[in-house]
Image (tube, rainbow, N blue to C red):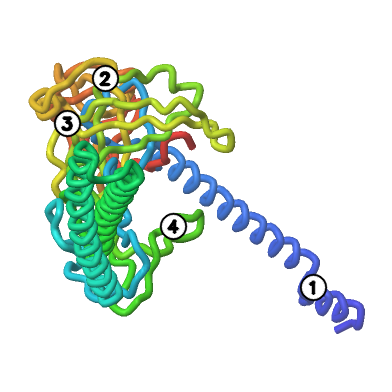
């Protein structure tokens, strides 16, 4: 075999590496293209089948009388009759006879002061009065004796048995005795007034309730040395007890100055207390205080309760609704309270329904509409307050459909 022929055959047996690498590149490109097409297909399928977005709102419960409310204001419960009970004289507190929260009657003894000094003062005044009585008795005797002497001397003078000088002397003695008796009488009157004053000071050691009410706070303990109470901007000095008449409670509401002209004396109002979330109190607008707080640009309006306020206490936070027209307890009880946005109610198969969101799906729930109130509908019946419902549900939204919820306004 010739060498040329052998070399040609060997070259035919060699692998063409450039052709193999081109094939590999084409395969990789094809695989990549297939993967991209699969991803695009999956994304398109997900996009076409993903749940639609729906804006969501909540069913809310309207506050009683909300439809008749002209404006609302915040405030606090106040007592129109309250007092710091303190002694009228300085002294050491001997005993406090009541406790916080206790109801007391007008005139009831609340506390006592140590009274030894006052007792001594009364005894001294009474002794001085007895001495004045004795002095008056002596002066009266002297006046009577001088009167008899004057009468006898006058008779003797008429019979020329006494000289004019003796008559003048008898008359002067009588006048002096009468003046002394008058002075003694005045001293006795003064002594008796001193006794009355001493007894009055002694009575001040017994501290009594100024009115019927409730003890709200104890300010001093036994043994404290007190003076008549002085109220300063920082503290109360000298008070023993703080009491309040819980039958005189009202609400002081702060109304902005640009709205205060809408409030009138005698206007009906409703009071809501944070301490009684399920209760409404009928009330009447009272005093509109003729002053504006420059710092807050508000005025104070006093609102008086129309009914019993058992359990209500001063300083409780309150909200007041001033009404445009009168309401009654019955009308408030019968008032439809459920409120939903107007756009959430649609008609399906002749029924008015809302779409309730639950576990990522929407479900039709029938409602009974009473009337429209501004941008909301008042419902006679429907989902309970706090239920999430879809806004603007379109025709494509179906019962039981899965959705994606976004909050209203986003």
Q: Give the quarter of the figure containing the N terminus.
A: bottom right
Q: Which of marks 2 and 1 is nearer the N terminus?
A: 1
Q: Which of marks 4 and 3 is nearer the N terminus?
A: 4
Instruction: Name the one closer to the observer, 22 or 73.
Output: 73
Residues at badges 2 and 3 in contact (C-beta under 8 Å)?
Answer: no
State the separation of the CA atoms marked 4 and 3.
Answer: 35 Å
Q: Earlier in the sequence, mark 4 or mark 1?
A: 1
Q: Which of marks 2 and 3 is nearer the N terminus?
A: 2
Across and down, in percent, residue 220 comes to: 33, 71
State the separation of the CA atoms marked 2 and 1.
Answer: 117 Å
Say above or below: 172 vs 337. below
Q: Crowding near pointer 2: few (<14 within 10 Å), some, many (20+)?
A: few
Q: Does any portion of residue 334 appear in the rendered image?
A: yes
Badge 1 element: helix
Instruction: Name the one closer to the observer, 336 or 311.
Output: 311
Residues at badges 2 and 1 in contact (C-beta under 8 Å)?
Answer: no
Closer to viewer: mark 2 or mark 1: 2
State the separation of the CA atoms marked 4 and 1.
Answer: 124 Å
Q: Crowding near pointer 4: few (<14 within 10 Å), some, many (20+)?
A: few
Quadrant of residue 288 within the rendered picture: top left
Q: Which of marks 4 and 2 is nearer the N terminus?
A: 4
Q: Does any portion of residue 317 appear in the rendered image?
A: no
The residue where tag 3 is placed is 306
Q: Residue at x 48, y 28 (%)?
A: 256
Q: Which mark is residue 266?
A: 2
Closer to viewer: mark 4 or mark 1: 4
Badge 3 element: loop
Q: Residue at x 82, y 79 (%)?
A: 10
The residue where tag 1 is placed is 12
The residue where tag 4 is placed is 230
Q: Residue at x 58, y 33 (%)?
A: 294
């Amino acid at each position: 075999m010739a060498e040329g022929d052998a070399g040609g055959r060997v070259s035919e047996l060699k692998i063409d590496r450039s052709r193999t690498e081109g094939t590999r590149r084409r395969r990789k490109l094809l695989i990549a293209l297939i993967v991209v097409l699969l991803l695009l297909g999956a994304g398109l399928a997900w996009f076409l089948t993903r749940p639609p977005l729906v804006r969501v709102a909540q069913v809310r419960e309207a506050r009683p009388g909300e439809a008749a409310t002209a404006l609302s204001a915040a405030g606090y419960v106040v007592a129109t009759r309250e007092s710091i009970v303190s002694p009228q004289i300085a002294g050491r507190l001997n005993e406090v006879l009541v406790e916080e929260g206790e109801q007391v009657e007008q005139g009831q003894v609340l506390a006592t002061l140590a009274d030894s000094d006052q007792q001594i003062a009364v005894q001294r005044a009474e002794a001085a009065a007895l001495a004045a009585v004795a002095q008056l008795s002596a002066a009266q005797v002297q006046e009577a004796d001088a009167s008899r002497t004057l009468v006898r001397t006058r008779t003797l003078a008429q019979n020329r048995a006494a000289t004019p000088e003796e008559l003048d002397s008898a008359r002067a003695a009588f006048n002096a005795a009468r003046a002394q008796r008058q002075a003694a009488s005045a001293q006795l009157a003064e002594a008796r007034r001193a006794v009355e004053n001493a007894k009055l000071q002694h009575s001040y050691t017994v501290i009594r309730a100024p009115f019927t009410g409730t003890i709200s706070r104890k300010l001093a303990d036994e043994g404290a040395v007190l003076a008549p109470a002085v109220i300063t901007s920082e503290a109360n000095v000298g008070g023993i007890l703080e009491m309040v008449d819980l039958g005189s409670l009202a609400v002081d509401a702060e109304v902005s100055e640009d709205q205060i002209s809408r409030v009138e004396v005698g206007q009906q109002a409703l009071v809501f207390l944070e301490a009684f979330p399920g209760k409404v109190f009928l009330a009447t607008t009272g005093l509109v205080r003729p002053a504006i707080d420059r710092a807050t640009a508000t005025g104070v309006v006093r609102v008086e309760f129309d009914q019993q306020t058992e359990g209500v206490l001063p300083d409780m936070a309150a909200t007041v609704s001033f009404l445009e027209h009168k309401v009654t307890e019955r009308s408030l009880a019968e008032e439809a309270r459920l409120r939903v946005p107007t756009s959430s109610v649609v008609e399906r198969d002749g029924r008015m329904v809302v779409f309730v969101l639950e576990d990522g799906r929407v479900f039709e729930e029938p409602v009974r509409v009473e009337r429209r109130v501004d941008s909301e509908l008042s419902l006679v019946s429907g989902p309970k307050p706090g239920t999430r419902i879809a806004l603007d549900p379109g025709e494509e939204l179906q019962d039981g459909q899965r959705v994606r919820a976004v909050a209203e306004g986003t």
